[in-house]
Image (cartoon, rainbow, N blue to C red):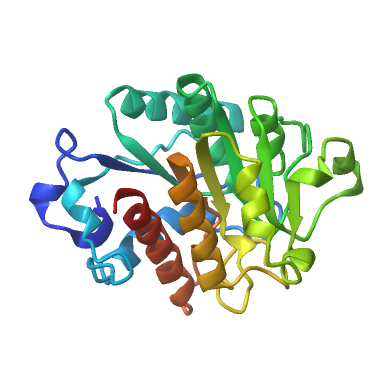
Amino acid sequence: MIHFGDIPQEFCDEQKSEIVILPIPYDGTSTWVKGADKGPEALLEASANMELYDIETDTEVYLKGIYTAPAITQDASPEAMVEAAERETKKFLEAGKFVVTIGGEHSVSIGPIQAYAQKFKNLSVLQIDAHTDLRDSYEGSKNNHACVMARAQDLCPIVQVGIRSMDVGEKDRLDPKRVFWAHKITQCEQWMDQAIEMLTDDVYLTIDLDGFDPSILPSTGTPEPGGLQWYPTLKFIRKVIERKNLVGFDIVELCPDPNEKSSDFLATKLLYKILSYKFA
C-alpha cells in the first residue's frame, strides 16, 4: 500500500498518527469521463514527490503523523459504499483522528459527512465545486454523485462556492443566498468573508476538483470553464480555518491522465496545504 507523502515509517503508525487519509476509489455513478476510481492511487503516488516542508506556514505537518488507511473497496452499490464509508469514518473519529477522505467520485463524500454530522451537532458543510449536486435522486439512487449536497443539506446548513453548472430542477433546493457563483466572486472582494459568516462553528469541507479551472486542473471527469484559481482558493480555505473549526475534509473527482501529472500533484499539494493550515 502507498503511504501518503512517502513519509518515514515512524510517522505512518495508525495508533500514533493524528491524521488519517481514507481512500475511497469508487466510480460507480459518474456519467461522463470514467476513471475517478484511479484518483486516490494517483494522488498518493504524486505525494511521494512532494516536499514535506511548507514554506507558507513554516511547518512540517507530517510530524503530527499521517496514517494512510486501507482503501474502502465496497462497490456493490452506491448505498453499500456510503454505508461502508460512514462506518470507517466513524471508527476513526471515535479514535480521535482527523480524517481526510480522498476519492473517487463525489458520492464518496456522503458517508463521511453523515459520520461528521453525528459527531458535531453544530456542523455545516462548505462545498467547493463547479456543480450544485442538489438533485434529490439521480439514475435511481439518492446517493448518486449528483446528489451529494442534497444529502448534506438533509443534515445541516451548506455553503456552495465556485458553482457554474446546474440543472434547472435543482433550483427548488437551492438557497441563492448561500451560493457563491463563479462568475460573481471574480467581481466581489468581500465574497470570502460573506461565505465564512454563513458557516457554523464546526465546518466540514468537501472539494470537488472540478471547482478549479481546467487550465490548472484538467484531469477531472466533468471539467467546466471559468473555475477557481490556486492562490485565491488557498487564501479562502486558510481564512475558513482561522475563523472556524475545520473538523474534516475530502478531495474528490481526480480523474488521472497518465500523460498529465500536474493535476495529480495539485490535488496532493492541496491536501497537504490544508493540513498545514489546520495544524500550524
Q: Position of residue 98 (x, y in %)?
A: 34, 38
Closest to the observer, 34 or 56: 56
Q: Position of residue 16 (x, y in %)?
A: 14, 37
Left or right, 181 with respect to 157, comes to right
Q: Position of residue 221 (x, y in %)?
A: 63, 61
Rendered residue at 40%/55% (across/down): 274
Q: Can residue 76 be seen at all in this image of the molecule?
A: no
Rendered residue at 73%/67% (across/down): 188
Closest to the observer, 245 or 252: 245
Q: Can residue 108 be seen at all in this image of the molecule?
A: yes
User: Considering only vertical position in the picture, is 153 above or below 236?
Assistant: above
Closest to the observer, 32 or 276: 276
User: Considering only vertical position in the picture, is 275 above or below 52?
Assistant: above
The image quadrant of residue 187 is bottom right
Rendered residue at 27%/55% (across/down): 4
Left or right, 230 with respect to 24, comes to right
Q: Residue furthest left?
A: 10
Left or right, 230 with respect to 156, comes to left
Rendered residue at 53%/32% (across/down): 113
The image quadrant of residue 68 is top left
Say which quadrant the C terminus sits in: bottom left
Q: How many marks?
A: 0
Q: Position of residue 214 (x, y in %)?
A: 63, 74
The image quadrant of residue 119 is top left
